[in-house]
Amino acid sequence: MFCSLELASRSKRSSAIVSTLVFSFLLTCSASAQQYEKELSASGKALWTIRNRTGRVSVIASDNEKDKSSLQATSSGAPVEPGDIVVSGNEITVRERPYRIDLVVRVPKRSRVKIESETGMVDVIGDFEVADVVTNTGTIHADVPLDALKLKFSWLSSRPRFLSDVELPRVKEGRGGSFSISGTVGPDAKRKKQKKEKTAEQAKATEPTDDKAAVASSADNSADSSGQTPQNKEPERQGLVRLNFTTQRGVVLLNVDPSMAPNDLRERALTVAAKAIVRSGNPPLTDAIRKVSPRMFGDFAKTLPPPRSEPSLVTMHQPGEVVTSVSPQLMRVNASVTDRNGRAIPGMRDDDFSVYEDGNERKIVNVTPAVEPFNLVLLLDVSGSVEERIEFIRKAARDFLNTASPQDRISIISFNDDVKVISDFTTDRRLLSKRLDELDAGGATALYDALGYTLVSTLKPLRGERTAVVIMSDGDDNKSFVPFPAILEATIESGALIYPLYVPSGLIPEGSVPKPSITVDPMRTKYLTITTRAAEEGEKLAAVSGGVFYPIKRLDDLQKAYDDVVAQMRTAYTITYASNANNSSRRRVRVRAKREGASVRLSPVVEIH
């Protein structure tokens, strides 16, 4: 049976945000058949006014002059009727309904728009002349050209919460607890501002003193208007984009994919985990920290030595010569093989596997059964959500230490809003158990930062070896610098197996009581489940790494999960093969197990250095 794994390179800030919005919009519509479309008649550069109190509004300025202005609407409830949306000239108003109506509006390039909302998200995408947005708590997301940008972001009832792909002017505090950010961004905007100031100074210094000077000035202007280009005239540059965003308590995202925004957008001092990530140089993780705390990031980055570039030997070939790889790269992938009943298949050798990369079979160098020790990181959540249950965490961790194979090297890292290394890698179980007494509880939950720290700092020196991370948490992050998509990418690149053991907070105190009550408060059942977001993210982490996600529903499930994690690692195989593929960041790898009914699950492919 085949198992395939495709690895894709990291894309930069996507210019395909428009496609994503429209795709998700159409997907929703096709699923619920609630779509309404209408072609709009654009009247030159008139102001477009859009009002939608609760639904999402996405306004897209099209670069293609042939594109017609249009409106698409979808509903979370009953089908959208023409009367639900009032269109009068360039004004669009969504009427109050008991369900949410979302809009996607396409307008010409360099349009002027005004959007009014309360709780709905607003997207402004493309090249606008002016975009005025007013919300209450809704997120405002802009994806616009940054060559010449003039902005004013105002928060009337809260401290600023924003994330930007470029450094913005400093926050100013106003009256009544209001805050604002205003100024210009981009080389063209600054150049225009400097030119305007210089022109004003020159005009003041060279005011005409007689009629002759006045006539000369008039002649110069006439020459410019005649179509002759002065030698010092600058080439045409990006038109100025003006963004005026006013919100009570909303979030502002400037040229940042909303999915890449962390839960806490307040600029704050870098933690131990964040500094370690910055030192690692991991692009997606480091970039995420830069966007959240640009000034703190800049100050810390200045203290770091410049990155070293390793020398490399380059073989020159004659033009037209077909180059083949004389010394193929050695790549490594972990494979778990099970039968139809889910039981692991032991004793497999080199000739029991076939490896295909991009459709071509590759030579297997060796297959190593998982009898070699693993490097395990036990990542323990000791945040405020489990503060009164620290004894449970200690006991659960010790149970895992007793379950793991004696030859496995284990490191223990605890985390709340930052990380703390409880123990480096060791096989000394007695020492590890003793170190668990050092656990301290309290604080927020920076799960993604802790996992990022583990991948790029603790496990990076062990790249190519057997590595795994066992996470014990409720899975709800609320304090990390880095967002989940960046962690997902770092997980793929690391080659480490991830085993999320997510324990609902409500389970822990019930198990900690020596003599549980005969009756249980039925209201507690709502705390006995993992949140939807945590479960989805736990499943994704396990899937991309080749691990397994364990949603713990009963305390008895914990020991079963421990036993299964150890069994999974003990019955895996490490396959090393020779890759003749070019240094591509995208390769598709398939592994076939030559056993009847065998099923294969793969971890990410990593290069052996």
Image (tube, grey):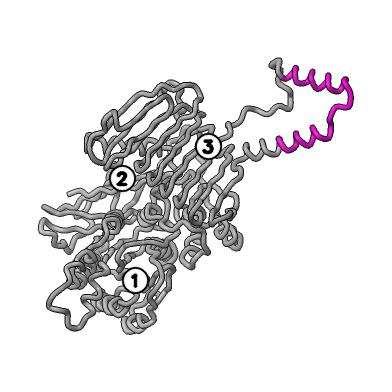
Where is mark 3, residue-wise? 145
Viewer-nearest of discs 2 and 3: 3
Residue nearest the viewer, comparing 175 with 233: 175
Q: Secondary structure at mark 2?
A: strand
Give how far apart the Cα atoms at labels 1 and 3 are.
43 Å
Of the residues shown, which amino acid type is indicated by label 2? Arg
Quadrant in the rendering for residue 304: bottom right
Q: Secondary structure at mark 3?
A: loop
Residue nearest the viewer, comparing 464 with 248: 248
Of the residues shown, which amino acid type is indicated by label 1? Leu
Viewer-nearest of discs 1 and 3: 3
In screen coordinates, is 304 left or right of 441?
right
Q: Residue at x 58, y 31 (%)?
A: 239
Q: Residue at x 33, y 65 (%)?
A: 467
Do residues under tags 1 and 3 come within 8 Å of each other at their CB atoms?
A: no
- What's the magenta bit mostly, secondary-structure-wise? helix
Residue 548 seen in this snapshot = yes
Where is mark 2, residue-wise? 588
Quadrant in the rendering for residue 483: bottom left
Of the residues shown, which amino acid type is indicated by label 3? Pro
Q: Percent from the top left, x then y, of residue 523? A: 20, 67
Quadrant in the rendering for residue 33: top left
Q: Earlier in the sequence, mark 1 or mark 3?
A: 3
Q: Residue at x 43, y 57 (%)?
A: 482
The span shown in magenta is: 195-224
In reply to whether residue 54 is colored magenta, the answer given is no
In screen coordinates, is 9 left or right of 549?
right
Q: Earlier in the sequence, mark 2 or mark 3?
A: 3
